[in-house]
Image: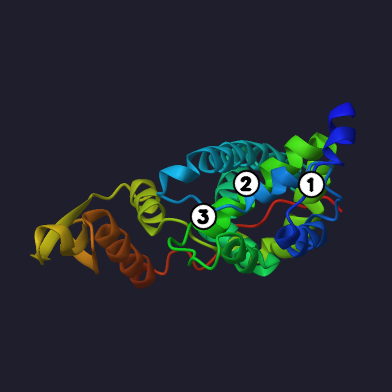
Amino acid sequence: MLRAFFSFFKPVPAESKELLAAIREMTGLRPADPNIYLAAFRRKVDDQSQKSANMRYERLEYLGDAVLGVLMAEYLYEKYPKGDEGYLTSMRSKVVSRKALNRIAVKMGIPEWMQQSSRGRRAGTTSVPGNTLEALVGAVYVDQGWNATKVFVHKRLLDAYVNFDRVEKEVISYKSLLIEWVQRQKKTFEFEVLEENGAEHRKRFTMCIKIDGEVQGEGAGQSKKAAEEAASRAACKALNLGRREPSRPRRRR
């Protein structure tokens, strides 16, 4: 509390006041130490002069990732009292996947402020919005503690932006889905490279998957892993896998 009291008097850059107002809107909280939140919105850059700022950002991202994982597990544990370990693990993986976190971050308006805080630089990689969201969760935890972070994650993120009925129907990996089906059916499978084109640093692979010796799907990608996933997706479509979900565990009312 004493730390928070003195942090209240720390000067905040004038150009950051709009960002801090947006953060208060996103979190529903009044920052005790605004500078922690500003650090969460600083993108990683290559400039060595930014090394200290980058480290602070990375530390908040690391912490936020861990805290978000625990709070997500707790949320699902309470929401689905009949869900077994496999179901809960699958749901958690879907909600905290990079794609899902990016989607939440965009809905919150994070990319807009992320770009402003980095002086107009583009976001660059598609993982940056989700990473910034994790850093924001880390900042809330450092600044406000566990209970406030729980309310922020459960109410402001999950309740507000995640459609769990839709999440249940999402498939993270068609390859994993297909392999699980093949094993249950006691069949054999193998991937085969059909084509490999392009320069060494810009390869493109075309692969197929055979089930019991019969080709069930083909796909292409810039790596063998990506091509296997594309071929698996085609095979799942052909075999009508992943379109029907098993009966859902009962939710907490």
Query: Residue 40: x and y, percent?
Result: 64, 48
* Whether residue 82 is visible: no
Position of the N terminus by quadrant:
top right
Q: Of tags 1 and 3, which is closer to the observer?
A: 1
Residue at image mark 2: 135
Q: What's the amino acid at mark 3? A: Arg
- Between 160 and 63, the one lying in front of the other is 63
Q: What's the amino acid at mark 2? A: Ala
Question: 245 left or right of 171?
Answer: right
Q: Earlier in the sequence, mark 1 or mark 3?
A: 1
Position of the C terminus by quadrant:
bottom right
In this picture, is 208 found above or below 32? below
Query: Residue 249: x and y, percent?
Result: 70, 51
Q: Earlier in the sequence, mark 2 or mark 3?
A: 3
Q: Which mark is residue 11?
A: 1
Near mark 1 (Cα within 10 A), the count class, few <14, some 14-19 or many ≥20, is few
Question: 222 left or right of 164?
Answer: left
Q: CA distance from mark 1 to mark 2?
A: 22 Å
- Between 91 and 223, the one lying in front of the other is 223
Write the residue at 42% across / 43% down: 48
Q: Of tags 1 and 2, which is closer to the observer?
A: 1
In this picture, is 35 found above or below 195? above
Query: Residue 233: x and y, percent?
Result: 35, 66
Q: CA distance from mark 2 to mark 3?
A: 13 Å
Write the residue at 75% across / 49% down: 153
Residue at image mark 3: 98
Question: 61 left or right of 249?
Answer: left
Q: Earlier in the sequence, mark 1 or mark 2?
A: 1
Query: Residue 133: x and y, percent?
Result: 63, 53
Near mark 3 (Cα within 10 A), the count class, few <14, some 14-19 or many ≥20, is some
Q: Of tags 2 and 3, which is closer to the observer?
A: 2
